[in-house]
Structure formats: structure tokens, C-alpha cells
Amino acid sequence: MTKLVGFFDRHFDRFRAVPIAKGKAAREAAQAKLESEYDKKLKTAIKEEHKNYTPQSEKDLVEIIRRTPTEALSIRDRNLISGAMSFKSRKASLIMMPKDDITFLNEKDNLGPLALDKLYKTGDTVFPVLNRNEKVCGLLRTDKLDLLHIGKTEPVAKLMETGVAFARYDYTLEQLLAVFLRNRTDYVLIIDDKEKLLGYAELGTLISVLFNREIKDDFDNDISSSAVANRRDDE
């Protein structure tokens, strides 16, 4: 911006100093010529200013992105940049679902058709399992149950998976992503610094925040190599 200001300082007085002793026609011609010259130099100065401009802060960069026309940077790409830029500063608590939304099971519970039906009706697919000390000792995933188990009663302890991942509520989203990846899971329980359970977070929600939009894909036959190989671009 300093160069542009310098341009105004150098040329403004000259622009005003149109000769006044040559008559009206001469003055108008001189002024028109000077205006044309002024406009060309102004456009050049602005172009050079923009070409050489380097943002000095994140705020400057955001402003450049905001003012970039959609022909050069789509709204989808703007959202992606915005989500990535804020990823390190946002906390796990941002995407956490509260403890009150969790349906807990006990490791001593028996799981039969009626109990399973109640779980399905919650709309969830992952259910933390508590031991006798009221600590989470595993997860029951109804979407991964063997169909053979649905018709008979089985103890929850036999059907659950052990090894539950935890993250603290003040983790950054980047740290939370590392927890998901290290533990190869899509479900993490959120606790405070006193080990109190606060809620849970899911990998899908985290990815949506990273891309700043919901990830949608109606194709759901990924376990079939034939279907994947023959999938059309519009599917």
C-alpha cells in the first residue's frame, strides 16, 4: 500500500496544475491528456501493488480469500481453506456430543431380540459398556453384530469390543484426529482432566469440520471390488 500512496503523492499536484494561460480549449485538451496518463499510471500502480502484496497476518489472508471472485476460488474451496486454517485452534469440545446423549450398557447385561430392538430405535450404532466399577470397559457396535446373534440371547461382555480410546476435552482437533488414527477407531470418549466422562466424538463429524461441509456419497458398495471397478463417475 506504501507504493500506491507514493503514487498519489507524486502525481496529484501535477494533475491539478493544468496550464491556465492557453485558453479554454487548450486547458481541456491538456487536462484530458493528463487524466488519461493519470489513469494509466494509477492502474499500473494498483496492479503492481496487488502483485507484490504479501499478507502479514492470518486476517490479511482471510480478507484476500474473501475478496477473491468465485470464478477463481469456489465457495466449496473457500470452505475447505477456512476449515483447514481453523483446525489447529479449535477444541475437541466443539464436536463433542454430551454424555446425556449416550446409551450405556452393563457388561453383565444380556442382549436378546427385544433389547437389540430398543438399541436400534435409539438411532445409534455404538454403545459404551460399563463394568462393575461404573468405568467404560468396552463398546458394543450393533452394526457389526453377527446376524446369528440377533435371534438368541448373549451376554454383552461376549459381544463387545475391548480397547476404548479417550481424548481430553481441551485437545485441539488436530490432536483428536491423531487419537482416531492411532487407535484405528471412529469413536472416542471425551473426558476432563479428572477422568470424568463428558461425552463422545465421532470421526465423521471431525472430517466434516475439517472440510467445513458434510461429506456425502450415496455409493455404499465398497466391499465389492466389481462394483467399485465399474462405478460410474456420476454415482
Image: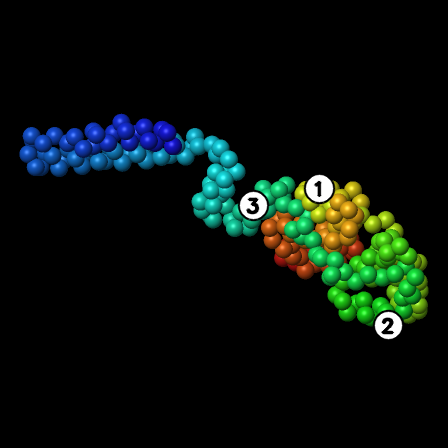
Q: Residues within 10 Å of mark 3 (few under 14, many from 20)?
A: some
Instruction: Specify whether 56 is left or right of 25.
Output: right
Residue type at numbered disc 1: Gln
* Residue at the image position 52 percent from the left and 50 percent from the top: 75
Dot 2 falls on a residue whose secondary structure is helix
- Return the residue at label 2: 114
- Return the residue at label 3: 82
Q: CA distance from mark 3 to mark 2?
A: 46 Å
**Residue 102 rendering spot, x and y as whole percentages:** 76, 60
Q: CA distance from mark 2 to mark 1?
A: 39 Å
Look at the numbered discs 2 and 1 and tell me whether their residues touch, using CB distance below 8 Å. Answer: no
Q: Residues within 10 Å of mark 1 (few under 14, many from 20)?
A: some
**Residue 152 rendering spot, x and y as whole percentages:** 93, 69
Residue type at numbered disc 2: Leu
Disc on res. 175: 1
Give the mark, 2 or 1, whose residue is nearer the N terminus: 2
Q: Residues within 10 Å of mark 2 (few under 14, many from 20)?
A: few
Give the mark, 3 or 1, whose residue is nearer the N terminus: 3
Quadrant housing the N terminus: top left
| Along the viewing direction, whichever of 75 and 166 lies nearer the viewer | 166
Q: Quadrant of residue 19?
A: top left
Q: CA distance from mark 3 to mark 1?
A: 18 Å
Residue type at numbered disc 3: Ser
**202 w.r.t. 42: above or below:** below
**Residue 12 rendering spot, x and y as whole percentages:** 24, 31
Tell me if residue 6 can be seen: yes
